[in-house]
Image: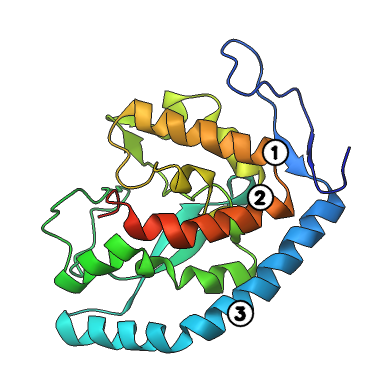
């Protein structure tokens, strides 16, 4: 087995209902290589995006009340929770405690500049700091907030395979996103497609696949209508 391939800790049966789905993890050389790539590429992207990020932050502060950054608890590696950063795209009205309401198309909470940021995915740029801090990777399953639901059911209740996504660090982008599975997860079918893509990514991971996903993200995400 290649040093840069994930290894099975328990039995793994991708996409096979009724069979056990085990946890997956990258071996140590793979983990080290992925972390080094995150640091090098993360620094490069942050250097390139630094000035635009300053301008975006200023525009947010000038056009709506509240901070430029939005901080939200998300579920990361091994189910541990961390604070994920984003540019604030909504009016600064906190949701009720213990709830997580996903943004919807034409959501009245979204500001004018926020709509543009979400459409271009530039609201995700502050997560470069999460990547450099080690709580996220450039590529991996997207992290979700606790208590997020699909069609009224918690993600964990929709599929027993959902938890397997947490055996690797969450990412700024991933295989599911370049396939179009982004935006509101309002149906169980959408969530299942995301889970399928995330587990396929974990099972077939390589540094080359990460680079291809990053390249595809630059081209694909900007032209997709599913973020709002």
Q: Is residue 7 above or below residue 209?
A: above
Q: Position of residue 193 (x, y in %)?
A: 44, 31
In this picture, residue 51 sits left or right of residue 79 = left
Question: Within 10 Å of the Cα at label 3, are there few (<14), some (14-19), or many (20+) other Cα atoms?
Answer: few
* Residue at mark 3: 44
Which color mode does the image show? rainbow
Foreground pick, 77 / 196: 196
* Residue at mark 2: 209
The answer to whether any part of residue 81 appears in the image is: no
The residue shown at (29%, 71%) is 88
Mark 2 or mark 1: name the one nearer the start of the chain.
1
From mark 2 to mark 1, how far is it between C-alphas?
A: 8 Å
Q: Is residue 118 above or below residue 12?
A: below
Residues at circles 2 and 1 in contact by the CB criterion of under 8 Å: yes
* Residue at mark 1: 204
Element on which disc 1 rests: loop
Residue 40 occupies which quadrant of the picture?
bottom right
From mark 1 to mark 3, how far is it between C-alphas?
A: 26 Å
In this picture, residue 170 sits left or right of residue 37 = left
Foreground pick, 19 / 2: 2
Mark 1 or mark 3: name the one nearer the start of the chain.
3
Element on which disc 3 rests: helix
The answer to whether any part of residue 106 appears in the image is: yes
């Amino acid at each position: 087995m290649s040093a840069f391939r994930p290894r099975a800790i328990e039995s793994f049966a991708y996409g096979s209902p009724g069979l056990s789905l085990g946890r997956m993890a990258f071996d140590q050389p793979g983990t080290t290589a992925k972390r080094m790539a995150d640091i090098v590429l993360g620094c490069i992207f942050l250097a390139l995006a630094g000035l635009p990020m300053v301008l975006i932050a200023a525009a947010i502060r000038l056009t709506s009340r509240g901070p430029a950054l939005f901080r939200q608890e998300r579920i990361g590696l091994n189910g541990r929770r961390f604070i994920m950063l984003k540019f604030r795209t909504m009016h600064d009205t906190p949701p009720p405690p213990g709830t997580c309401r996903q943004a919807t198309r034409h959501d009245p909470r979204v500001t004018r500049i926020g709509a543009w940021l979400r459409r271009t995915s530039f609201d995700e740029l502050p997560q470069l700091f999460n990547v450099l801090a080690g709580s996220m990777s450039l590529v991996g399953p997207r992290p979700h907030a606790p208590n997020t639901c699909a069609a009224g059911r918690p993600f964990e209740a929709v599929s027993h395979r959902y938890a397997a996504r947490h055996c690797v660090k969450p990412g700024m982008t991933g295989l599911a996103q370049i396939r179009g599975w982004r935006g509101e997860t309002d149906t169980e079918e959408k969530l299942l497609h995301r889970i399928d893509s995330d587990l396929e990514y974990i099972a077939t991971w390589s540094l080359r696949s990460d680079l291809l996903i990053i390249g595809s993200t630059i081209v694909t995400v900007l032209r997709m209508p599913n973020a709002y």
